[in-house]
């Protein structure tokens, strides 16, 4: 499984396309709900080039009218995914205690 900076991007794209919405339409619907997101940022989210905080998952699920669980791939091999997200190759959002 290819992991970028998030796991939900491909599902967001799939659900958006199934609804026949452009990225611009989805961004506008998210903006109306209160999330100031650009189409560029949405594109990076779908391409797994940016992280997706938990609050953004709430917005996405609400606007796409799906459960948060539906935004994630099915049958995730957590034993394989966990080490990839914890590897030294990934950028940390917050400094570790040693870096602080």
Image: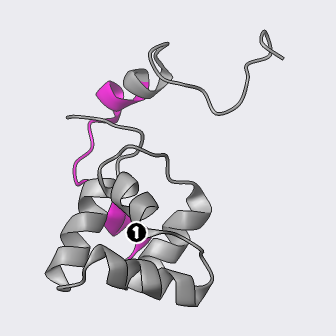
Q: In what quadrant of the picture does the N terminus appear?
A: top left
Q: Residues within 10 Å of mark 1 (few under 14, many from 20)?
A: some
- Residue 23: x %, y % from top left: 31, 74
Residue drawn at point x = 50 percent, y = 53 percent: 52
Q: In this view, does 69 lie above or below 17?
A: above
Q: Residue furthest right?
A: 100
* Horizontal side of residue 67 vs 32, given as left or right: left
Residue at figure coordinates x 22%, y 54% from the top left? 74
Is residue 55 visible to us here?
Answer: yes
Task: Tell how many labels.
Answer: 1
Residue sitting nearer the eye, 32 or 96? 32
On the picture, is 19 further left or further right than 33? Answer: left
In-front residue for pair 86/9:
9
Q: In the depicted view, which residue is nearer to us: 80 or 44?
A: 44
Left or right, residue 19 beside residue 99: left
Q: What stretch is highlighted in magenta?
A: 67-82
**Please, is residue 82 above or below residue 4 in the view?**
above
Q: Does the magenta stretch include residue 11?
A: no
Residue occupying the point 49% across, 12% down: 88
* Quadrant position of the C terminus in the picture: top right
Horizontal and vertical percent for residue 25? Answer: 34, 85
Which quadrant holds residue 78? top left
Q: Is residue 77 magenta?
A: yes
Residue 59 lies, in percent from the top left, at 52, 75
**Which residue is identified by label 1?**
39
């Amino acid at each position: 499984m290819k992991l970028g900076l998030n796991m939900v991007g491909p599902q967001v794209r799939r659900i958006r396309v199934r609804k026949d919405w452009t990225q611009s339409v989805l961004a506008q619907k998210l903006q109306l709900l209160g999330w100031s997101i650009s189409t560029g940022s949405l594109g990076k989210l779908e391409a797994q080039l940016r992280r997706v905080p938990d609050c953004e998952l709430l917005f996405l699920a609400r606007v796409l009218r799906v459960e948060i669980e539906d935004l994630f791939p099915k049958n995730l091999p957590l034993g394989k995914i966990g080490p990839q997200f914890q590897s030294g190759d990934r950028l940390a959002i917050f400094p570790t205690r040693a870096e602080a």
